[in-house]
Amino acid sequence: MNKEKISYKKPLLETPFHKRTSEHCYANDWYRWAGYKVAKEYSSTELEYTSMRNTAGVIDITPMHKYEIKGKDAKKFINKLITKNITNIQSNQVAYGIWCNEDGMVIDDGTIFCLNENHYRIFCAERNLNWFCDTATGFNVTIEDISSSIAALAFQGPLSCKILNLLKVENIENLKPFHFDNYKLENQNVTISRTGFSGDLGYEIWCDPSQAIDVWDSLFKFNRDYKVLAAGMNSLEMVRIEAGFIQPNADFMSAEQALRPNRMRNPYELGLGWLVNLDKEYFTGKQALIRHKEKGPEKKLVGLDVEGDKPAVGSVLYDNSKKNIAKEIGIVTAAMWSPVLKSNIAIGFVNKEYYKLGSNVYAEIYHPEELDYRKIWAECKVVKKQFFNNPRRNAIPAFI
């Protein structure tokens, strides 16, 4: 056994990019993700966010959990696992999906990469090996955790395609959204997918750990003219809120980790009903999801346009502007002042009487000011939670 990897010897593992991320991380501010340390902030969250919205940002996403599914029943197994129907998925295509327990409560979400009819990879934020193996009972498939054998970078921003083009990544501008292929990045053979967590034009680069430093250095090669920055988890949180993407154990509790049943959420409560295909054959949670859909969600995750400029982080939501008689009807799960939208936005749960678009609710915001808190009563309008969705995200050919 490699003593360097024993948890008490080295509590946090370092990704294959750590030699470079540690050089860039002037703030020395690290985040724990799946046993690895990745940068929370390199130097300035605001500058890192700005790079993703104006040039391009590089995010180390190596700690994502990665699973390889092989065998003649691979597609059948995945169709049982997830709520979406992937019967027609083609090689080099990526599907976004969620999987639920038998009660129809969401365990996790992730991207499914189809290498061929009998070979898939699933990338997700949480550990799922035990769940996948249990679900695969009776299927002719093998499931392997390949998390440590693939290093990964997200390369997100309006100039991401242009820079890859300058690096002579052939025909990258014609890669369709939610597709992937094998490319040569300078002298390295890598896989690039047109996917990401920013709501903008962007790519994810998957490579062997031995290639990590060369791949990282390539993306910064043209920094004399194009200011690419290493971006940390704080800035990634900002762009994902603007894009309306939800995150397990942040916006909702994974059904496998929730200690209390009332903390679990079904897809309809999360606004993910579009990912549920009740017409396909049996899949885990189908009968429960039929009942959930018929009943309708008691509460729902929505977007909120918040009055003022003070972020409603962790705020409780109320039904009435009169504080003395207001009734609690929801809670904010994520919030920020959006620099690019010049708007105060939030994502939160509200009761069914208020999740219709255009409904008005009120947030009780506690804003820190010089070691004290000022209480603000802010009006909020229920809106679509996809606040930012630039057309270049799906343009073909991509913006160069």
Image (cartoon, rainbow, N blue to C red):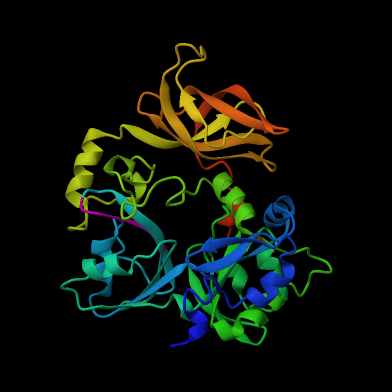
From the top left corner, tell me how far across and down residue 347 is, in percent.
Answer: 50, 38
Disc tally is 0
- Across and down, in percent, residue 75 comes to 27, 71
**Image quarter of residue 73:** bottom left
**Residue at 38 percent of width and 48 percent of height:** 253
Q: Quadrant of the N terminus?
A: bottom left
Q: Quadrant of residue 164?
A: bottom right
**7 part of magenta stretch:** no
Residue 79 visible in the current orientation: yes
Q: Quadrant of the C terminus?
A: bottom right
Please name the residue shown 51% across and 11% down the image.
322
Horizontally, residue 225 falls left or right of residue 3, namely right
Looking at the rendering, the stretch of residues picked out in magenta corresponds to 95-102
Magenta stretch: dominant SS? strand
Which residue is at the front of the view, 244 or 329? 329
* Residue nearer the viewer, 368 or 61: 368
Q: Position of residue 373 (x, y in %)?
A: 64, 28
Relative to 22, is 30 above or below?
Answer: above
35 relative position to 216: left or right: left
Q: Is residue 35 left or right of residue 293?
A: right
Q: Point out residue 246 in the picture as x, y percentages from the top left corner.
A: 46, 48
Mark yes or no: residue 397 visible: no
**From this viewpoint, which residue is outermost toward the front?**
8
Q: Is residue 121 above or below residue 311?
A: below
